[in-house]
Image (spheres, rainbow, N blue to C red):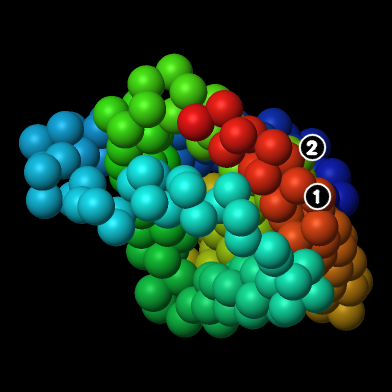
Amino acid sequence: MAGNYGFIPGQGGRRAQRYNHVYMIWFYLFLGSFFLGVFLMNMGNELLLTENGIFSPASVERLRYIEIDSGRFLRYVLKHRVGESAALILLSTTALGLAAVYVWVFWQGMLAGMTITAAIIRFGIKGLLLLLGTLFPHQLLLIPAQVMLLAWCFENCGRARSMGGGMYGNGGMTPAYGSRRQRLLRQGIALLWIAIVILIGCILESYVNPMLVSDLVKIF
């Protein structure tokens, strides 16, 4: 997922091992925060699951009759997705970049755990079905794009630090080969690809997903 800057014998394998290790850390961090979210929602459901809270009967009822302006919704979704991505990218150029990546993974895991638990507490299996409906089909693109963006930011953090002989100087991940212009070009192309995938996901979220959700809420 992170950019490929060429091959030097011995470095490619070490670099791949390093990233596999990082992905496993992200996975366990996400899994741990997911179960934390489940725990928090179960322990605080009386406080968190109010009449106007997430997946409340009133909010689901509104979905039956609401008419969404897809163009306006797209602008809202883009503002949210682009703002979140831009914040990660900007932070990846600072000393807070690595911390931001791990905090983002932790927050997404906890949010996922709380959301799934809330849906099941509210409506049981039907709630899980409604939740899946709210995620389809755009998350099939947005989730991989978010993982790619995290990898891009992680590598950007490493590149910035390695310029001063930091943590990647001896780790096999520093792209010390190839011109700076080539590295920036590849990095820019990777970011452009991620942006295109996010844009397509946002379009699906704004124009396709509302129709699916409006059909799903009819079973409630």
Horizontal side of residue 7 vs 77, given as left or right: right
Disc with the residue nearer the chain's start (1 vs 2): 2
Q: Nearer the viewer, residue 208 or 10?
A: 208
Establish if 46 lies above or below 125.
below
**Residue 204 can be seen in this image:** yes
Tag count in the figure? 2
Q: In percent of the image, x 78 and y 68: which residue is there?
A: 70
Residue furthest to the front in view is 65
Q: Position of residue 43 (x, y in %)?
A: 9, 36
Task: Estimate the spatial distance between the alpha carbons at disc 1 and disc 2, rounded to whole Å.
Answer: 47 Å
Question: Which residue in the protein does label 1 denote?
Answer: 208
Give the quadrant of residue 167. bottom left
Which amino acid does the dot numbered 2 rest on? Pro
Specify whether 96 is left or right of 139. Answer: left
The quadrant where residue 181 appears: bottom right
| Closer-to-camera residue (204/103) | 204
Residue type of the residue flagged with mark 1: Val
Secondary structure type for disc 1 = loop
